[in-house]
Image (spheres, rainbow, N blue to C red):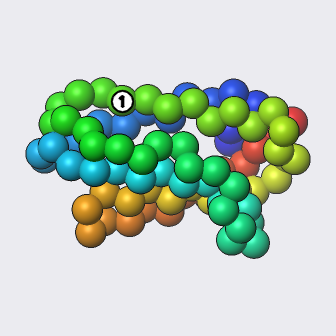
Amino acid sequence: PIYAKTMIEFQNTESDSHVLIELFSATGTKIATLFNGDIEQNVLYNTELNADRLAGGIYLCRIVHGRQIINKRLILIK
């Protein structure tokens, strides 16, 4: 579950690389790009998800790191 303001923390332990984090509605519509940038190895990064204007419900978070794509389901509680 997530709330109106949620912090997303991430770290890459392998090497410097590029990371893209996006938020989608349950129907697949892109809502926001939360992070799009290069990161350094072993540095903790964070980005804030401000969901004040979003309706409660299910959202998808996609994290792209090199060839790896991670999809996570988020439930916004209002």
x, y (%) of residue 10?
37, 37
Q: Is residue 54 visible?
A: yes
Viewer-proximal residue, 48 or 71? 48
Which corner quadrant of the image does residue 31 belong to? bottom right
x, y (%) of residue 6?
63, 30
Q: Which residue is mark 1?
A: 45
x, y (%) of residue 77?
81, 39
In the picture provided, is 20 more to the left or to the right than 28?
A: left
Which corner quadrant of the image does residue 39 belong to? top left
> Vertically, is 33 above or below 50?
below
Decide: few, some or many residues near mark 1? Use Cα within 10 Å; few <14, some 14-19, many ≥20: few
Q: Which residue occupies the extreme left position in the image?
A: 15
Amino acid at the residue labelled 1: Tyr
Q: Which residue occupies the extreme bottom position in the image?
A: 27
In the picture provided, is 64 more to the left or to the right than 12?
A: right
Q: Residue at x 68, y 41 (%)?
A: 1
Q: Residue at x 16, y 36 (%)?
A: 41
Total tally of numbered discs in the picture: 1
In the picture provided, is 34 more to the left or to the right than 70?
A: right
Q: Is residue 13 visible?
A: no
In the picture provided, is 57 more to the left or to the right than 18?
A: right
Q: Residue at x 71, y 67 (%)?
A: 29
Q: Secondary structure at mark 1?
A: strand
> Looking at the rendering, in which quadrant would you find the C terminus?
top right
